[in-house]
Image (spheres, coloured by chain):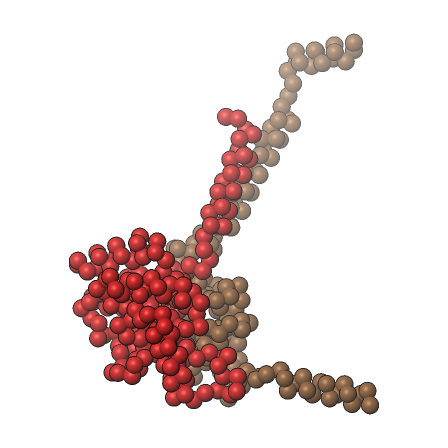
Amino acid sequence: MKRWLIILALCSSAVWAGEAPPRAEDPQVEARLVVLAEELRCLVCQNESLASSNAELAEDLRREVRKLIRQGMTDAEIKTYLVERYGDFVLYRPAVKPLTWPLWFGPFAILILAVWGLWRYLRHRKALVHQRMSDADNAQAESLLKE
Amino acid sequence: MKKFLIPLALFFGLVAFLAVGLKRDPREIPSPLVGKPAPAFSLPTLTGDQPFSPADYKGQVWLFNVWATWCVACREEHPLLVEFSKTQSVPIIGLSYKEVQAADQTNGPLSDDAKLSLARERSLRFLQRQGDPYKLSVMDLDGSVGIDYGVYGVPETYVIDREGIIRYKQVGPVTPEILETKLLPLIRQLEKS
């Protein structure tokens, strides 16, 4: 009896789960959409990708991308299409161009600067350690130690 | 030079960076459409007259305002638009953006005709009650024109010049301050040229 209740409960949950998202007819289109949508940002909920977002705009944009895939556009063309409308911001991986150079190479520049700074600091310290004491200093140190 | 000042200066530099970063609105995304021709479309109007397309307004400066009755921020800016339409000569064209939402279709999806008539009925009622700032409104039921215009948060307002070029895009409601400092000066300048 209990088991049947559980099964019944499991079945009914599928009933009130609401409409399932419409299945695409073409699994190939869907596969490409998933890969593309992972790379695109949802503009409403900005830290979600187009693939994971439930926002209505994301739904519309997925539909649009599906349409473009069916029209035979390449992934690069579809990205350009969206960038023309929404700007570089839709791309999770921004294009490498002069404007985004600081973004792409800035961290490495900072790293090189930091390594250079560290190298200079260490050299300076090494020089301090290796500084020889003059004979006069030695004599003075000795006399102080004897006291 | 006093060496202890270096970390202090670095610290304040960091604070300045973070302060600027915190003040910026992440929703303000520069639109790539500014400076480009307004995307063409042809859509049915709210009142069912001739379909409207942006080319019809070539030769004059106009505002393109994306709105919907379900959009709370649109209600916020609505009185300002009504005021604007009374005092300024520049026409406002409305884009009724996805008026019929998923919430309206819980009993199964509506047909396109049913959507259009529901959207018209609701929009007209809204405009009758709140005032109608629009020269005309076009119906973008599935939001595809919205995608062409890079709409991601209603309301949005575009300033389009005589040549049909988008000169400014405002995301979010137009406030009196934005109207005074950005829209009006730009419109005056565009009308002169």
Q: Nearer the viewer, residue B126 or A8?
A: B126
Residue situated furthest right in the rendering = A1
Instruction: Name the quadrant containing residue B50.
Output: bottom left
Asked if one can make out residue B109 in the rendered structure from this viewpoint, the answer is yes
Q: x and y percent of residue A76 in the render?
A: 42, 72
Q: Nearer the viewer, residue A30 or A44?
A: A44
Q: x and y percent of residue B7 in the render?
A: 55, 35
Asked if one can make out residue A86 in the rendered structure from this viewpoint, the answer is no
Quadrant the C terminus of chain B occupies? bottom left
Quick check: A55 left or right of B135?
right
Q: Identify whether A54 is placed above or below B161.
A: below
Chain shown in red:
B
Say which residue appears at 60% left-offset and 35% top-offset. Answer: A122
Instruction: Name the quadrant containing residue A123.
Output: top right
Instruction: Name the quadrant containing residue B85.
Output: bottom left
Q: x and y percent of residue A91 in the render?
A: 46, 65
Say which residue appears at 51% left-offset and 88% top-offset. Answer: B108
Say which residue appears at 32% left-offset and 77% top-offset. Answer: B138
Which color has been applied to chain A in this rendered view? brown
Quick check: B23 left or right of A81?
right
Quick check: A18 left or right of A95?
right
Q: Identify whether B98 is placed above or below B113.
A: above
Say which residue appears at 49% left-offset and 84% top-offset. Answer: B105
Q: Nearer the viewer, residue B45 or B87?
A: B87
